[in-house]
Amino acid sequence: MNIDNLERQHLEINSLFSKINKNLNSNNITNDIDSLVWDINTLAGKLNIHMKTEDKFLYPELINGANENLKKIALEYSQEMGNIHKVFEEFKSNFNTKNKILNDIDKFLIESNKVLKLLKNRIDKEDRSLYPKMKLI
């Protein structure tokens, strides 16, 4: 399976993480709120496409493939992703508009850092542990 598209998506998602983190760490979050909302919703769209691609094509191919190591990893990652997707969907639902963020900036900052760390760790895990193994077969 060619994973170039998935790797490209990871680069785009990581770029959005950086932009969002920069805005989260600014001195006055309200100055960058429109950009922040745009980036959160863009991230949601890119993650949705990426997760669907993995769930529909990548993981089923690996689970049904001959490589036992990749099969095991795919099963584990697929189960983990369900939980991660749920956490992100809740975050997006709570903070996908300017008013929702401004209504509780402190909670938004706490949740943003938690969710972005969770997503970043997952993408790094795929880049370190899964994708290199796939390139070897």
Image: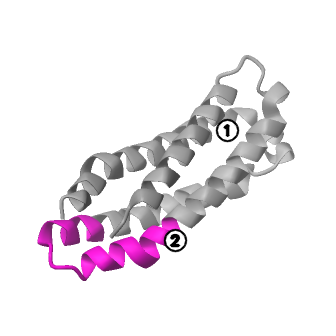
- State the SS at label 1: helix
Q: Quarter of the image holding residue 18?
A: top right
- Mark with earlier residue (1, 2): 2
Left or right: residue 79 versus residue 120 is left
Which residue reaches farthest top? 27
Q: Position of residue 102 (x, y in %)?
A: 82, 38
In this picture, is 128 found above or below 136? above
Indicate the amino acid at tag 1.
Answer: Lys
Q: Which mark is drawn over residue 107?
A: 1
- Please provide the residue range marked out in magenta: 51-75
Quadrant where the C terminus sits is bottom left
In this picture, is 121 found above or below 24? below
Left or right: residue 34 versus residue 87 is right
| One can see residue 73 in this view | yes
Q: Quarter of the image holding residue 111?
A: top right
* Residue under the image location 67 percent in, 38 percent down: 107
* Residue under the image location 72 percent in, 52 percent down: 41
Q: Which mark is drawn over residue 52?
A: 2
* Residue under the image location 61 percent in, 41 percent down: 16
As for residue 69 lying within the magenta part, the answer is yes
Q: Position of residue 85 (x, y in %)?
A: 52, 62
- State the SS at label 2: helix
* Residue under the image location 37 percent in, 71 percent down: 58
